[in-house]
């Protein structure tokens, strides 16, 4: 039996997410955008709630195609607000469109969103050594710095807690506990 981080339940979806995705360094802009959007919708909710709706989000938001999302009309936004398969928070849906537009601007300025976001860690994974899940912070000074910069660039719903969760999910930080089998793998 594999030892996992204590936050992982016995839900097969959660186990697969933990074992295959969480903490794996992501440098692909499309996947970075997907995680950013999912983390945005997660704000104030449990991650498993978002994870269970991930495929619905993928369908509703055209495969997380930020180029397409950036051009969403008011009619499309209103249809998303009627979609029971996603989290129908008006501010978060609108923020997704705004964030897609800001995401593209960062790509234009830095060549890719990946180059922009990973520059905050000099392109390296920050490997923490937490023994317990409770040891890991909800936010860090670096997450606060990134959050502030993203907000300055027009992003919404990107507070330091959301950004730190994004950093964890996309492997900018390795926050698997030291007793987790994934700790040494990512």
Image: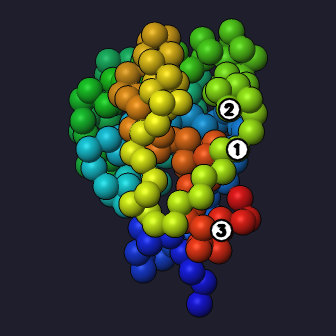
Q: Residue at x 46, y 66 (%)?
A: 132
The residues tagged by marks 1 and 3 sit, at their Cα atoms, a distance apart of 14 Å
Looking at this rendering, what residue extends furthest in the bottom direction?
Answer: 1
Is 86 left or right of 51, judged from the image as shown?
left
Q: Give the vertical position of 97 relative to 63 (above or below).
A: above
Q: Give the vertical position of 27 relative to 178 (above or below).
A: above
Quadrant hosting residue 76: top left
Is 66 left or right of 107, judged from the image as shown?
left
In the rendering, which numbered label is found on residue 182?
A: 3
* Image quadrant where one finds the N terminus: bottom right
Examine the rendering and report whether any part of residue 100 can be seen.
Answer: no
Packing grade of label 1 (10 A; few <14, some 14-19, many >=20) is some
Quadrant hosting residue 7: bottom left
Packing grade of label 2 (10 A; few <14, some 14-19, many >=20) is few
Element class at badge 3: loop
In the rendering, which numbered label is found on residue 125?
A: 1
Element class at badge 1: loop
Image coordinates of residue 180 in percent, x first then y, are: 59, 72
Residue holding disc 2: 121
Foreground tag (2 vs 3) = 2
Q: Residue at x 43, y 57 (%)?
A: 135
Image coordinates of residue 18 in percent, x first then y, are: 55, 65
Dots 2, 1 in contact, CB < 8 A: yes
Q: Residue at x 31, y 31 (%)?
A: 92
Image coordinates of residue 51 in percent, x first then y, are: 42, 57
């Amino acid at each position: 039996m594999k030892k996992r981080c204590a936050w992982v339940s016995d839900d097969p979806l959660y186990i697969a997410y933990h074992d295959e995705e969480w903490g794996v360094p992501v440098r692909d802009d499309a996947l970075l955008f997907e995680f950013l959007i999912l983390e945005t919708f997660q704000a104030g909710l449990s991650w498993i709630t978002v994870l269970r709706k991930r495929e619905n989000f993928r369908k509703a938001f055209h495969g997380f195609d930020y180029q397409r999302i950036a051009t969403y009309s008011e009619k499309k936004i209103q249809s998303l607000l009627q979609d029971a398969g996603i989290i129908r928070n008006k501010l978060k849906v609108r923020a997704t469109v705004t964030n897609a537009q800001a995401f593209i601007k960062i790509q234009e300025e830095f060549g890719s969103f990946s180059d922009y976001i990973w520059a905050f860690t000099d392109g390296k994974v920050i490997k923490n050594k937490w023994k317990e899940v409770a040891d890991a912070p909800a936010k860090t000074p670096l997450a606060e710095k990134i959050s502030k910069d993203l907000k300055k660039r027009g992003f919404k719903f990107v507070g330091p807690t959301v950004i730190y969760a994004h950093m964890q999910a996309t492997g900018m930080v390795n926050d698997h506990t030291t007793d987790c089998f994934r700790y040494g793998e990512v």
